[in-house]
Amino acid sequence: MEEKKYYTIIVFTENQAGLLSRVVSVFSRRHINVESLTTSRSSMPGIHRFTIVAHVDEIMVKKLVAQLEKQVDVLKAFYYEPEEIVYQELALYKVPTHIFSNSTSVEKLIRSHNARV
């Protein structure tokens, strides 16, 4: 039996009503828990992107991608292993401006963590 990993599945689709439930039903029929699901517009007009993370083995992720590509409004589906993914975090903080004008310690702290203002 193969080792289970967290695979990231990317699905490009047309924007159609009911497509989200059809995509999720591919996972629920196989009793696979979706760890994360994000939908957004892609850089191409009229095309949307689903980013799905699931904890499965490689055989199952290949079956899932093949099943997703059979859906009518799905254009293409891909899967990636954890080593192939680049993660980036973003944080927004609200800081009063008088803190910056009175002290340079805040600026030093920001620079030491390669952050931007």
Image (tube, rainbow, N blue to C red):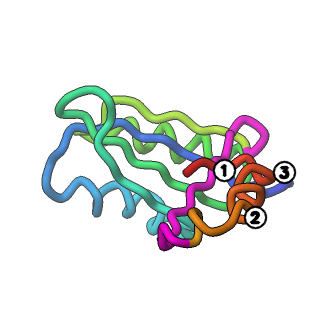
Quarter of the figure that contains the N terminus: bottom right
Amino acid found under the numbered disc labelled 2: Ser
Number of numbered discs overlaid on the protein picture? 3
Q: Is residue 32 visible?
A: no
Mark 2 or 1: in front is 2
Q: Which mark is residue 115?
A: 1
Question: Can you give x and y, in whole percent of width and height, for residue 112 in the image?
Answer: 81, 52
Q: Earlier in the sequence, mark 3 or mark 1?
A: 3
Question: Can you give x and y, in whole percent of width and height, for residue 57 in the image?
Answer: 73, 52
Where disc 1 sits, the SS reads loop
Q: Residue furthest top?
A: 44
Q: Is residue 115 visible?
A: yes
Residue beneath disc 2: 105
Task: Please tell me whether residue 90 belongs to the stretch shown in magenta.
Answer: yes
**Residue visible at 27% across and 26% down?**
44
Question: Can you give x and y, in whole percent of width and height, for residue 96 in the image?
Answer: 48, 73
**Residue visible at 69% across and 56% down?**
107
Specify whether 44 is left or right of 107: left
**Mainly helix, strand or loop, the magenta region?**
loop
Residues shaded magenta = 82-98
Q: Which mark is residue 6?
A: none
Amino acid found under the numbered disc labelled 3: Glu
Q: CA distance from mark 2 to mark 1?
A: 14 Å
Residue beneath disc 3: 2
Q: Residues within 10 Å of mark 1 (few under 14, many from 20)?
A: few
**Residue visible at 65% across and 38% down?**
80
Q: CA distance from mark 3 to mark 1?
A: 40 Å
